Image (spheres, helix red, strand yellow):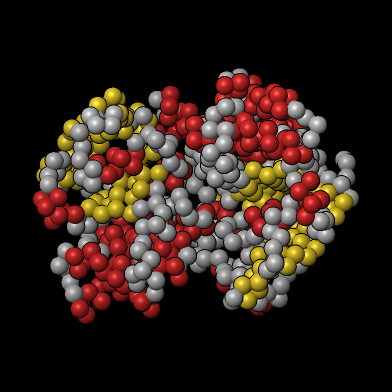
Amino acid sequence: MATEALLEVTDLVKHFPVKRGILIDREVDQVRAVDGISLSIPRGQTLGLVGESGSGKSTACRTVLQLIKPTSGSVKFDGQEIAGLSRRQMRPLRREMQMIFQDPYASLNPRKRIGQIVGDPLRRQGVAKGSELRRRVSELLDRVGLQAEHYNRFPHEFSGGQRQRIGIARALALQPKLVIADEPVSALDVSIQAQIINLLDDLQDELGLTYLFVAHDIGVVRHISDRIAVMHDGKIVEEGSADQVCERPVDPYTKKLLAAVPIPDPRESRERRAGAAAGG
Amino acid sequence: MSGPLLSVRDLRVGFGTEAGLVQAVDGVSFDLRPGEVLAIVGESGSGKSVTAQTLIGLTRSKNARIEGSVKLGGEELIEASDAAMRQLRGERIAMIFQDPMTSFNPVYRLGNQIVEAIRAHRRDVGKQQARARVVELFEAVGIPNPERRVDDYPHEFSGGMRQRAMIAMALALEPEVLIADEPTTALDVTIQAQILALLEELNRKRNLATILITHDLGVVAEAADRVLVMYAGKVVEEGTLDEIFYDPQHPYTWGLLGSLTRLDKPRPVRLPQISGSPPSLLALPDGCAFRPRCPHEFAKCRELPELTERLTDAPRHCDRCWLGPEEKRAKRQVEGQIGLEAPA
């Protein structure tokens, strides 16, 4: 199974220096944002990474993608070591790993038309141009549930859910193997969240994508993930199958996190609160 | 049971824009009793926040058209003067907001900001006395080391602590009504649980009437007594917490309940989803506003249904849907769970 993994992260560390001083920078401390994490995602599967703000999950994503240089550790993508590669060496690999961001308002250039935004990765990587580019963009828009006539519109003409679809189309343009989604639904309305999650599910089935899905909402993560890793203070405190982590958590922090998730069922919620009050 | 403390009747709020009149709130009515927690649920653009802001006069402006009646203990607030509203805000109705970072002035110490609020209303309270009161309030909302922390600046507080400080400020003048607009949306789940527990405790200990505005039905299940579900400016369903969760009548409510991810249930292959997106308030369909997204639409839906009691055994459980109770019961169950669309 180990050879099947598309992404293999071993002892990944990212420490940020805390500096003081005006003329001479002295390093006085370190922020251990990612403190030795190991992950493995088999092809076509989804690993959910959960944690609260400040747990280091976003830094972990960016370090895996080499958007931030890791302090130490290894990141193997498709069998190739990518930790420490230069920007130029990374460039051909970028096609294969794409990212979907949290904020559909901030992650799309407001001055560009949708066609340009979605087509940009294809043009920059020299994959397609002219009418071929246009055809592929229309196909992508169609695939994520937008219409071809949206091609010439600007981001502000779209709702949050539609913008997230645009972000997904852009991420898929280069037919990546790995998609890292950092809180892709947390800025969306509840009814739209389900649409986007179902879309991501369908795309995975159709295209055989591998996902690293990062979110603070454990319910959402459990729904979409095969395995879940719980991150706390830069470390992974628990990792297991989605149902196992949610139903039989072992680590005290995971238990605390799960206990805090509101149960959308008044009777069960009352019982739990009564139980908590009785148990102190 | 005592009479309502706050009584809202046919509240309508419209804003004039270049593109036309946007009817953000279109005929909202409800009663709030002392000690009761009323949740207003809806998505962005449903009018839930505008409703809450209008109650304390925050939507008053040249281009706003506000109609209807808001009575607090018999006193009409819609026509009250700006001066009277200023007096009343904080004193009788207080509000806390989603983002506690932007709700405090970053360049003043937290304690001083609350002291200022107290002394603006109570001229006879001295600075030292007001400060002592703030320490007491910080203690009551669970801020550790209150004597020291009153002198901190907002940025020295974490998100959860800032939300506690805002609750302390809201309670400073012992209001009768607390409006909490998405009070936990910006917080981590473990902090959210603490803030919800704090709100519940205050509600119980002080008999505080609370309006909780949220899009999160999990939060509603933990905290509310009654629930209003809003869609496109109108209330589409109103009932007790249990009525809304166990006998929901409106297809939009089914969709909201169905699209929840549950940790305590086996996961479905697909999440039931509401297709499409909320309508623009400038181009509402005629009849039921949810019609274009509703899989159960039929000819009658082109007429707007009244918000009224449609069940014989549940007084005050109202909804706006033409389907009969039996049809609803049959249609809302999709493979064992409440939802709009059968999993494909």
Quarter location, residue A204: bottom left
Q: Nearer the viewer, residue B242 or B343?
A: B242
B312 left or right of B42?
right
**Tag count:** 0
The image quadrant where one finds the N terminus of chain B is top right
Q: Is residue B74 above or below residue A232?
A: below
Q: Nearer the viewer, residue B137 or A66?
A: B137
The image quadrant where one finds the C terminus of chain B is bottom left
Q: Position of residue B286 (x, y in %)?
A: 66, 77
Q: Is residue B132 visible?
A: yes
Residue found at x 57% / y 41%: B105
Q: Is residue B257 above or below residue B162?
A: below
Residue found at x 66% / y 24%: B135
Quarter location, residue B334: bottom right
Residue found at x 64% / y 43%: B96
Q: Is residue A264 visible?
A: no
Q: Position of residue B110 (x, y in %)?
A: 59, 33
Quarter location, residue B303: bottom right
Q: Position of residue B196 (x, y in %)?
A: 61, 35
B150 left or right of A238?
right
B156 left or right of B213?
left
Q: Residue furthest front?
A: A23
Q: Nearer the viewer, residue B285 or B58?
A: B58
Residue found at x 65% / y 60%: B47
